[in-house]
């Protein structure tokens, strides 16, 4: 069979050719890659790449190659169940079954030997003996071998079906008082210890008057993960491997049924009657053996170890060999690990392979980070057409239009002999009317210098001057108007009024539809209404976003001692519908909400005025109820919390004496709290956000002798070193403000100034690239004790 190679762009084919020659010397002829596995500490080595495979502890982990490339582990959490679902379907259709179990009663059962060997010591030992005979003879069979095993008379179809069901699903649905004896007999005959354990647990349950779920009982998902780890161990020991994949002399011994369960390509090859379905050795026309190494590893672990040094090659191989789930992880890497130095490569790759969604993501990244991208060497290789496309985009995110002009100049000067003639057309993408007079002085100086040093006819300054003098259209069309994919949403809040009787909490929801950049540093947010929450209005509440839905919990609806609430609501933006949820166990206000591990948690808060708590509750969507988990180690309110890399961090807040704290700690619902380095400054009713592996703390109030004062100092925490460092301070106080991270910028929204009790109705944005806080406009409604989040809203709301 001629394997399809698809369309390989010239630049990628050339890159592969060079890599192939460079790595060939480390691949031993006829042996392939070393497959001696010390389970979780395995090292896969080829040429200058040495990847430490770390213990699977979540969706990703990271390491570095010897050449300095950062290697990130991306895992597919449901890999085991996905693989076993396909294995079950293959068995039901008698496809790729290589082992027939025959009982003395004349019954026969066709199974996949690696699947059964993962649970049965008997089958595993027989596989070892069979493979030992093959290697002793020194001759590889000419065709795929099938084999059979005769079993004793004590086995019947009930017991055999139970063991098979467990091998393919991790559970036995029909295990009960009537079947337990037959299933135990089959498990004993086939030496299946995990099924014997299930039988023992079931027998213990039956002997109890009241059923009590055993905490030690493994779920079906856990059983399947254990089984696929056992199949992985068979692979590393080359037990039962029935096909050898040959990539230009590099050999990979694998189980064909695992390949078929992970790849549509191999499933078609091995089940559709092609000649490869009977061959014990199959040649593959991949450019590099290393790509197949990654994909074979994925079959057995559900993990890919990726870096920018080889992710494009692995992605191409995933496409070519139709490893759909591996391809999904590659695309996740390309989207989530994209940076200024790699985004233009992603643009080229996505364009070459027609990946529209990835291309859109990459284009959007370039527009969001144009300042950083324009400082890279790859930017200087952009085609003039592509560069002009970016320059003309309304979504180009830059601090000032002068930055756009400088980017054009750097691109032209990289090859001035050929590019200067293009400068005039590129300058058409610079919006000169958005510059200040001081900024335009630099335009004049640079333009005249470029014109005087050229022997070509260019009139850059006159063109720029004409544009600059034309002014901004009254309609505002000359502004850069960026519409982020996610909308920044404001929920509830309050407005200060000296007359408490005139104060009215808010039910309003607002969202930032677009970000406008005007002349110089003039920025503003385009706000739109998103409707109202159900009654009553609320402030000092908690909000969280989970699975695209907004959760609004607790808070206060007025200002007296007993106005704290325990009610909860959920908003679905797609349906534009609110649902009332089960109430909290405790009344709460002035507390944070976090989403971690697919769970919504509320942390501490005020039960009533001047009475805070340390309890923590978690929401169960199936039962629509809240339950207590491990409490905080102290009563807290006004603290900030956020999640970074799956861990919950909590900073500051009021203690039981209502003193502002400088504390920082980790919290886990089962393990409790772990103290970390204190902040430099104490604070409460502040904001904390996670961005690019660090935590940023801003705003709030602090202790100042016997009273509170605005805390304008800002700082950042590095979890890797457990240390704090200072940031640029806020221009004014933001107490009880909202915060969010939008497009790698930190937004602090509203609040009030403690010094004069005035509203801080401004929005400040912190940019990592500039290291400063910029004023980006005003709040649309309520400004204090408000909450913010990001939501993906339907497009009709944003048009």
Image: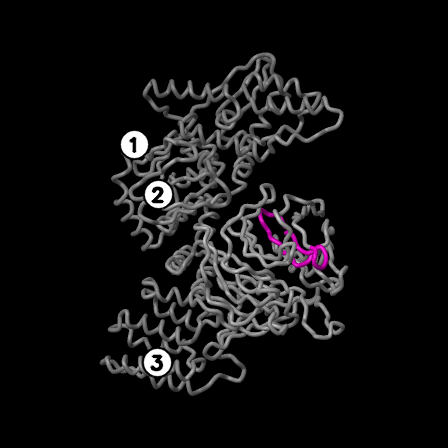
Tag 2 secondary structure: loop
Dividing the picture into quadrants, the one containing residue 578 is bottom right
Q: Is residue 76 above or below residue 375?
A: above
Mark pair 3, 1: CA separation = 65 Å
Q: Nearer the viewer, residue 9 or 367?
A: 367
**Labels 3, 1: front one:** 3
Identify the mark at residue 30; answer none if there is no mark.
1
Residue 254: % across, % down = 41, 32
- Residue 76, percent across and down? 50, 43
Left or right placement of residue 713 versus residue 415 in this view:
right
**Which quadrant does the N terminus fall into?**
top left
Main SS class of the magenta portion in the image: strand
Where is residue 770 drawn, in percent x and y? 43, 68
Left or right of 384 in this view: 710: right
Q: Identify the residue shown where x is 26% and y is 45%.
A: 22
Q: Earlier in the sequence, mark 2 or mark 3?
A: 2
The circle drawn on residue 442 is 3
Q: Which residues are magenta?
A: 588-611
Mark 1, residues whose alpha carbon is within 10 Å: few (<14), some, or many (≥20)? few
Q: Earlier in the sequence, mark 3 or mark 1?
A: 1
Q: Position of residue 566 (x, y in %)?
A: 73, 54
Could you tell me how far apart the alpha carbons at marks 2 and 3 are, in whole angstroms?
53 Å
Which numbered disc, 2 or 3, marks the residue closer to the eye? Answer: 3
- The CA distance from mark 2 to mark 1 is 16 Å
Q: Nearer the viewer, residue 624 or 26?
A: 624
Q: Residue at x 71, y 20 (%)?
A: 178
Of helix, strand and loop, which one carries label 1?
A: loop
Mark 2 vs 3: CB contact within 8 A:
no
Q: Would you name the residue on which mark 2 appears? A: 286
């Amino acid at each position: 069979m001629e394997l399809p190679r698809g369309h390989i762009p010239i630049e990628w084919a050339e890159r592969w050719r060079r890599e192939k020659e460079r790595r060939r010397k480390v691949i031993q002829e006829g042996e392939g890659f070393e497959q001696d596995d010390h389970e979780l500490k395995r090292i896969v080595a080829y040429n200058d790449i040495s990847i430490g495979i770390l213990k699977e502890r979540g969706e990703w982990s990271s390491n570095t190659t010897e050449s300095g490339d950062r290697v990130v582990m991306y895992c597919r959490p449901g890999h085991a169940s996905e693989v076993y679902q396909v294995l079950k379907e293959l068995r039901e259709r008698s496809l790729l079954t290589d082992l027939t179990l025959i009982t003395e009663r004349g019954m026969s059962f066709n199974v996949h030997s690696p699947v059964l060997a993962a649970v049965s010591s008997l089958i595993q030992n027989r596989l070892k003996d069979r493979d030992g005979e093959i290697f002793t003879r020194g001759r590889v069979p000419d065709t795929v071998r099938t084999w059979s095993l005769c079993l004793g008379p004590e086995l019947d179809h009930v017991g055999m079906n139970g063991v098979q069901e467990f091998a393919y699903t991790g559970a036995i649905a029909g295990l009960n008082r009537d079947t337990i004896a037959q299933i135990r007999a089959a498990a004993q005959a086939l030496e299946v210890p995990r099924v014997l354990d299930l039988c023992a647990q079931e027998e213990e349950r039956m002997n109890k008057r009241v059923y009590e779920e055993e905490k030690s009982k493994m779920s079906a998902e856990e059983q399947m993960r254990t089984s696929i780890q056992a199949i992985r161990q068979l692979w590393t020991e080359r037990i039962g491997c029935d096909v050898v994949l040959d990539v230009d002399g590099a050999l990979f011994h694998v189980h064909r049924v695992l390949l078929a369960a992970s790849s549509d390509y191999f499933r078609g090859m091995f089940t559709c009657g092609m000649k490869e379905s009977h061959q014990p050795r199959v040649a593959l026309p991949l450019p590099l053996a290393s790509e197949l190494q990654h994909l074979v590893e994925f079959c057995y672990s559900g993990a890919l170890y990726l870096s920018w040094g080889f992710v494009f090659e692995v992605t191409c191989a995933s496409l070519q060999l139709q490893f759909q789930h591996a391809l999904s992880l590659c695309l996740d890497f390309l989207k989530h690990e994209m940076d200024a130095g790699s985004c233009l490569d992603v643009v080229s790759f996505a364009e070459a392979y027609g990946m529209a969604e990835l291309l859109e993501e990459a284009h959007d990244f370039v527009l969001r980070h144009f300042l950083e991208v324009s400082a890279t060497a790859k930017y200087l290789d952009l085609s003039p057409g592509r560069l002009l496309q970016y320059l003309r985009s309304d979504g180009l995110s830059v601090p000032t239009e002068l930055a756009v002009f400088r980017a054009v100049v750097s691109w032209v000067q990289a090859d001035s002999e050929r590019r200067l003639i293009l400068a005039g057309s590129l300058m058409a993408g610079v919006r000169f009317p958005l510059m200040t007079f001081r900024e335009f002085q630099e335009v004049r100086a640079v333009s005249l210098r470029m014109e005087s040093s050229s022997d070509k006819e260019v009139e850059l300054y006159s063109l720029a001057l004409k544009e600059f003098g034309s002014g901004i259209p009254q309609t505002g069309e000359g502004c850069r108007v960026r519409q982020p994919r996610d909308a920044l949403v404001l929920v509830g809040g309050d407005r200060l009024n000296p007359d408490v009787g005139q104060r009215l909490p808010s039910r309003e929801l607002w969202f930032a539809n677009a970000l406008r950049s005007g002349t110089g540093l003039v920025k503003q947010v385009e706000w739109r209404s998103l409707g109202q929450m159900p009654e009553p209005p609320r402030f000092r509440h908690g909000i969280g976003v989970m699975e695209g839905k907004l959760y609004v919990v607790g808070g206060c609806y007025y200002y007296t001692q007993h106005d704290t609430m325990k009610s909860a609501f959920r908003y679905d933006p797609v349906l534009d519908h609110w649902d009332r949820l089960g109430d909290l166990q405790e009344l709460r206000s002035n507390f944070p909400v976090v989403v971690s591990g697919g769970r919504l948690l509320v942390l501490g808060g005020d039960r009533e005025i001047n009475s805070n708590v340390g309890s923590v509750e978690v929401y169960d969507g199936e039962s629509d109820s809240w339950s207590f988990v491990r409490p905080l180690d102290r009563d807290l309110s006004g603290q900030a919390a956020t999640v970074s890399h799956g861990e919950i961090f909590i900073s500051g807040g009021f203690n039981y004496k209502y003193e502002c704290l400088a504390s920082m700690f980790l919290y886990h619902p089962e393990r409790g709290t772990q103290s970390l380095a204190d902040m430099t400054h104490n604070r409460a009713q502040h904001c904390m956000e996670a961005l690019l592996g660090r935590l940023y703390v801003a705003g709030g109030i602090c202790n100042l002798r016997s009273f509170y004062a605005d805390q304008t100092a800002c700082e950042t925490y590095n979890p890797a070193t457990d240390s704090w460092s200072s940031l640029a301070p806020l221009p004014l106080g933001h107490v009880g403000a909202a915060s969010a991270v939008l497009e790698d910028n930190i937004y602090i929204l509203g609040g009030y100034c403690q010094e004069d009790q005035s509203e801080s109705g401004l929005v400040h944005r912190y940019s990592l690239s500039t290291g400063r806080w910029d004023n980006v406009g005003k709040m649309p409604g309520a400004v204090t004790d408000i909450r913010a989040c990001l939501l993906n809203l339907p497009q009709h709301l944003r048009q």
